[in-house]
Image (cartoon, coloured by chain):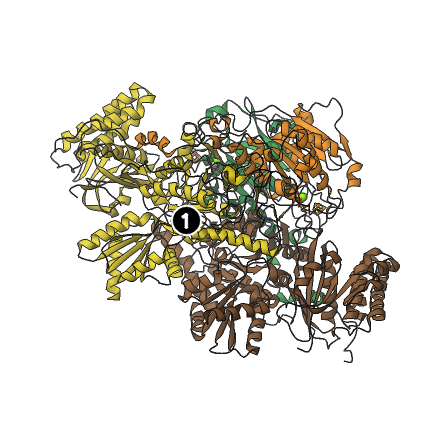
Chain colours: A yellow, B brown, C orange, D green
Amino acid sequence: MAIDLNLRVSGQAGQGVDTLGTLLAEVLHADGLHLFTHQDYMSRIRGGHNYYQLRIADQPLTAAREKLDLIVALDERGLQEDWPVAGPRPVVLVDGEFEQSEGLKLRVPWARLAEEAGDARYANTAAAGAALAQLGHPLETLLARLEATFARRGPEVVAGNQQAARAGYAFHLEHFSRMLPLHAPVLPPHGQLLLSGVEAIALAALAGGVQFYSGYPMTPTTGILTYLAQHADGQDLVVEQAEDEIAAINMCLGAAYGGARAMTATSGGGFCLMVEGLALAGMTETPIVIALGQRPGPATGLPTRTEQGELWFALHAGHGEFPRLVYAPGDPTEAFELTFLALNQADKYQTPALLLYDQYLADMTATVPRPDFSGLTVDRHLATAEEIGGDYQYARYALTDSGVSPRALPGTPGAVVEVDSDEHDVHGHIIEDAETRKAMVDKRLRKSAGMRQDMLPPLLTGDAEPDLLLLGWGSTKGCLAEAAALLRQSGERVAQLHCPQLWPFPAEAMSAVLQSARRTFVIENNATGQFRGLISRETGICPDELVAKYDGQPFAPQEIVAAVRSRRREKA
Amino acid sequence: MAIDLNLRVSGQAGQGVDTLGTLLAEVLHADGLHLFTHQDYMSRIRGGHNYYQLRIADQPLTAAREKLDLIVALDERGLQEDWPVAGPRPVVLVDGEFEQSEGLKLRVPWARLAEEAGDARYANTAAAGAALAQLGHPLETLLARLEATFARRGPEVVAGNQQAARAGYAFHLEHFSRMLPLHAPVLPPHGQLLLSGVEAIALAALAGGVQFYSGYPMTPTTGILTYLAQHADGQDLVVEQAEDEIAAINMCLGAAYGGARAMTATSGGGFCLMVEGLALAGMTETPIVIALGQRPGPATGLPTRTEQGELWFALHAGHGEFPRLVYAPGDPTEAFELTFLALNQADKYQTPALLLYDQYLADMTATVPRPDFSGLTVDRHLATAEEIGGDYQYARYALTDSGVSPRALPGTPGAVVEVDSDEHDVHGHIIEDAETRKAMVDKRLRKSAGMRQDMLPPLLTGDAEPDLLLLGWGSTKGCLAEAAALLRQSGERVAQLHCPQLWPFPAEAMSAVLQSARRTFVIENNATGQFRGLISRETGICPDELVAKYDGQPFAPQEIVAAVRSRRREKA
Amino acid sequence: MSILKDYQSQATTWCPHCGNFNILQAMKTALIELGLEPWQVCLVSGIGQAAKLPHYLKCNYFNGLHGRALPAATGLKAARPDLPVIVTTGDGDCYGEGGNHFLHALRRNPDITVIVHDNQVYGLTKGQASPTSPRELVTRTQPHGPQSEPFAPLALAVLLHAPFVARGYAGDLPHLKDLIVQAVSHRGLALVDVLQPCVTFNHLNTYEWYAERVYPLEEGYDPTDRAAALERAQEWGERIPLGVLYREERSVFGDDLPAISRGPVTERPRTPQQVESLLAEFEFAAAHGVAPS
Amino acid sequence: MSILKDYQSQATTWCPHCGNFNILQAMKTALIELGLEPWQVCLVSGIGQAAKLPHYLKCNYFNGLHGRALPAATGLKAARPDLPVIVTTGDGDCYGEGGNHFLHALRRNPDITVIVHDNQVYGLTKGQASPTSPRELVTRTQPHGPQSEPFAPLALAVLLHAPFVARGYAGDLPHLKDLIVQAVSHRGLALVDVLQPCVTFNHLNTYEWYAERVYPLEEGYDPTDRAAALERAQEWGERIPLGVLYREERSVFGDDLPAISRGPVTERPRTPQQVESLLAEFEFAAAHGVAPS
Ligand SMILES: Cc1ncc(C[n+]2csc(CCOP(=O)(O)OP(=O)(O)O)c2C)c(N)n1
Ligand SMILES: Cc1ncc(C[n+]2csc(CCOP(=O)(O)OP(=O)(O)O)c2C)c(N)n1
Ligand code: SF4
Ligand code: SF4
Ligand SMILES: [Mg+2]
Ligand SMILES: [Mg+2]
């Protein structure tokens, strides 16, 4: 890559780190650059130390990287938190008068410039101007974005912000022009989207025709609830904040029974409260999609950090045995695709589908291609009039080869739709005899056959017959890709396997891949190697190495490269 | 066995099937015979068809068997339900006049005899007398039990019941003496107990020093709540029915934090609601024992029937990663031992312990040896004064090699006990930094090492280097033992492996056993072979065959023998 | 017009003389009086003896989890405002396990009918105390009687402005049928707490016990007088009022939500392409063409 | 005698000017006035900004799950009646996620103090509506405002006979301190709902807004008059009363349970051998010796 810059905006909660970072990302993305951003913030509303990190390149990016080239520090005292990951000679922008600048610590008086522009609150905007100057990037798009963003606050606010931006930009050029700027020019427009993981999930929920969404706020899922609530009227869906997660999932199941496509999202603690409802969905054969946004547990854990600690829980949550689908997207694009798929599959098999993601994926944003809508359709798989018939003959749980029974909706003339959490007969009437029980268990579990046919294969990329195979799931996808590339650069034969569907599990495909590799590494954001355990159980092959991280932080490619190398030295 | 009789009392819910069956079991047990009983009842209070089955022998019994020798039918119309399992020539006792008797269907007018004894409600007692006559068993102990049972209802009721018993007994002898009675004589006293699974668990909870129990009614756990409630005052423990299962477990955790030994019990649906609390116990390192009584799911399923469908759920319930103990008793004796052990281990490792049982174990009763109390002690593993120290230096989560920190109780002068569901430092103060997070995850997971040292080995019985190895867990224990014996009688080399502890999992021991056998069969009361999957994941060895039953009914030994034989034919 | 046998369904499993039989009968006759066909009715229940009712009355039903009937009914009604939604639940189901949903359903006020079979005991699990059990009810689980004050569901409903609050009695079928008709016809959450003798496990609140105490609200009782309603809703013991205790006109859940007020959302399926318009938001416009670089 | 700095703990993470600071201060000064040392006090909390309080006040604490402080506190108090147990919780924590426990804690009446930081919003999760949010509170999650009527916790508490029901205001520290002292001293469940401005997410219920409305209950107000208390507990809008709204003498959870009323059960460990006496029950006596067979 000709351009590959790493910028961090840092400061206290409440100082606008997120807003400034987002603003810069939008501007650079709009001007044809490719972005990959991620955040780190504490579970507090004010104070502490948060950051928003932008990786900027002239080609698509799939991961963050270490080593900062530029730090915009809104809170100078917080800087020490950033140093550990700073590159060799990072440029640092802080507030203050030019004279106090020393070395690469450049001072731009953005507070003063903001005052001069009419309001101290424009300070971050002045900082944005200075940052662009440092990046050797023109100001126009920033000015346009300010216009767009502040229009509803009136021309004064727009003008003030724009003046602050200009002032920061000009001040930087004037005093620091002797310093060669970091090179982030305007590039030909790529017409792509700057999308975060939760935005992708929320968009897919809308594209997937979700008609009822009920949730209870919980990081990292609140963004989905909020986005859908904002578009409820325009897109015509019901969005309700429930009194608790138990209500949320049961509202969804009631709505789904009524025929609405229903979805909810929660994190581990809330998911615990939903698992009885999950089992109810399995028993009543009511389609529902649950997005499970993982964060470090157990219990409250680290509410705003990331982890992949609930794979096994997702696979076996809920009492009793019933079929389920578990998808785990690795990036915003996949998040859109799998959410959309999950909605259709849940309807097709009349059973719950889980979308397993994590905090890191939720907050990461990347420059991604526009989703292709041409082929997409919402497939409800509802019963036809013939299948329903009349005279109350309709049986909700009719026994079929596929295990899937024609699904009618309540309110159909001449038919009643009877749904029961007890074991039941084909009509949904409560039963207690062994024969019917067995027939119904078999019926429900028969669905797995079809689900296996529709199953997504693992994504294998890189060299055939590799010396090194890196296996992962979920948000490590892009990171493993870059790690693989780095290892390849040093002459290794490397392949990466990413598993977008975790249940049903593509056991055959996985075995084949595992056998083709000399040395296999599972890389996971958890302590116990859950994916590795799943591979063992399902294929009988236990991957050689586990690279586990469970401190709440995501992996960086360089970190994986280092881990892989050291393991091989140990074993060598 | 010289004596091995199979008696069933059947009738509608509300007719006193349970009471009559229990009464007969108590009498025969008291008179030196060995009993194994189990029940089958519907989820209703009146009507339907229930039964209480007694197997009677002169030696210890571990399982029920098919083929009835004697049926006492309180509801003649319900008899057709009993026929399928009737033996070749079962004697049937029904109400009615002698003249209507035909073949082996013997009529004793117990309704009339009861009326004559003063109250129609004594009918079942008259039937009991007749049953004993049929069994060639004397009346004295029955009369004594009636005295004991009805004393508080006054001498009249006692006398009336005794008269009815005598009348039924006499009537039977008079009219059916020509029929050779089934041979169930009085034997030398064995001084043992007639104990059910839930009684054993409840007794062990008391023996184990449980000081706080909170639960919410749910089959098959209500018996524990009830028994403890009855003895709360005498044994000095707090027992409270909570508003829901979430409250139940959180009450327990609050009490445990205060220093009380705490326990709760629930079934799958209620357990779903407890799993967030389970994770809280893991994070706060609060000891608690949860008895999980399985029944056929998902959702409400078959509330009064049996299944082993929640092994995987128990292993991975709760969000995030934390150590846990999972025990699965196979009979009333083991239920007592493992409940007692679970309470001590939970305190030793300051983490949750699960007792996984099922409806079948809950209701089965057997003649078992008195528990040996000599060695038993309640080990609380609390911090010493030295460990606590003064000046508020005490740290609840001090880092140790074992991962277990000295546990002080609130209210200790000069110390505060700070417990937190967020990730925390050694003092229990909320933290967000990666280093502390990692240190605390490591600390908690380090406990597994000690837990593994204390781990119970799998119980292997039977022939060495067997051709057939029968593997099971939980309530199939006694049934597999008898199946193994039956197979052995037909000249096979057979061994049985029963796994009383499921987590930590005794992987090494299991591998060794598996490798020593020619052909391995996992027998489970579920559809998906959960134990088999666990063995595969933990040992890398997948047992050859799965014998799965999931119709809500327990296995019978003969059934297992048949299944094993047919599998071998298939493969042969 | 439907007739009784149209609503024929499975055989019941209740104990003889259980109050539930009259509630079932009242429900059937009410539905007929309301001119509803089985396919037009939707029952939602949890778990318990009461919650088994949908199995004994031919109609659409969602028999869900213990305690969770209200959120399921709320979701169903939100998606299908065209269907009359009736919850049949028990005192443990609705006020115990489901207490939080009861509290918030009253606040949210969806247009559903809630019929609570209040037998002051947990029947299906064989006789433990329920939230409405009197302190005197000694059970095998509560040897000293329940350790909590009995809950006052109707008073709470009035307090939280439930628009229709009534008490029925399983011993008075015509009156109960009438209440159900009114409740189903009322817009908003209509609560009918039905005094239901459990002949097997509740030996305190028997038919005889009620016979001596229940009385119909007098002519001219004004159910719109909130203070009076609050008083009456708390009357218990010597005299127990039956009838519509409280009525209030109040906005219903969905009135402010277009997706609900427009009618069944299921009749307005969306296409994936509908969201393309939202993508612009994630594009961000550049303010200039390609820079010479 | 303890002094302020004895209660010193970690640095707070609240926003400047948050109402929580005064609640924290009031709590500390109240504990000192009550003559309690940090090791003698036990706080129980759930999750939320309010629920973080125990981290900022040196004492024993059990900081559990969102919504579950009340059952944890109930269990703790049952096991340790010797410890003063104080719950610090939020309006979402206590009335939303924890609503069922609130309902039943009022019925059960354990001897605990419950201090609700009522900011009418979900603070920690960045500003969604809570059960006490006014209909007017438009949030990013509630574009039309919350779709439920605001909950009336104090009125409910009076209705269910909570023995001590009070409202405090974070803007009036001395008064709040005083309420906490009374609440902790009161036997039985003492509820103090504290009006707490959230300067970041609640722009309706601000310090200014309250300043214009709150007033202390007049001299001679009789908190034992239940009807009046029910009235006052519902007063909201133009005028908002502060102080002890209701008092009632009532039996406390544990009074009828020997294992609690005997004092801390932890001080009476049992031995396994104690249950041997129960085994006879499972032996069943034979009425004769060995029969000749
Ligand atoms: C989560 C869960 N907990 C407990 C149960 C067991 N259970 C089934 S019904 C019931 C109580 C029923 O009482 P109520 O609602 O009053 O109904 P009734 O039987 O009295 O009509 C309980 C505790 C369950 N099915 N699910
Ligand atoms: C089971 C569960 N659901 C959701 C959350 C996320 N959560 C944490 S605090 C909170 C709401 C806090 O509101 P409130 O109790 O009013 O406290 P405040 O922050 O306003 O003081 C939520 C929804 C959680 N931690 N656990
Ligand atoms: S137990 Fe009670 S509530 Fe249940 S059916 Fe029998 S009488 Fe009715
Ligand atoms: S968000 Fe609101 S409640 Fe939370 S600390 Fe800030 S001001 Fe206080
Ligand atoms: Mg009931
Ligand atoms: Mg709040």
Foreground of the two, D192 or D129: D129
Residue B491 locus on image (x, y percent): 54, 79
Q: What is the quadrant of the N terminus of chain B in the image?
A: bottom right
> Is the residue A432 above or below the residue C191 in the image?
below
| Quadrant assignment, res B290 | bottom right
Residue B241 locus on image (x, y percent): 63, 49
> Is the residue B372 above or below the residue C153 in the image?
below
> Is the residue B58 above or below the residue B309 in the image?
below
Q: How many marks?
A: 1
Residue B211 locus on image (x, y percent): 61, 57
* Residue name at image x 62 percent, y 43 percent: C93
Residue C137 locus on image (x, y percent): 72, 46
Chain letter of mark 1 equals A
Q: Dot 1 lies on which element?
A: strand
Can residue B566 be seen at all in this image of the molecule?
Answer: yes
Residue A73 shown left or right of residue B268 in the figure: left
Check disc 1 and report the residue beneath it: A326
* Residue name at image x 41 percent, y 32 percent: C270
In the image, what residue type sits under mark 1? Val
| Quadrant assignment, res B134 | bottom right
Foreground of the two, D208 or C184: C184
Can residue D108 be seen at all in this image of the molecule?
Answer: no
Label 1 crowd bin: few (<14), some (14–19), many (20+), radius 10 Å: many
**Looking at this rendering, what residue extends furthest in the top direction?**
A155
Foreground of the two, A509 or C281: A509
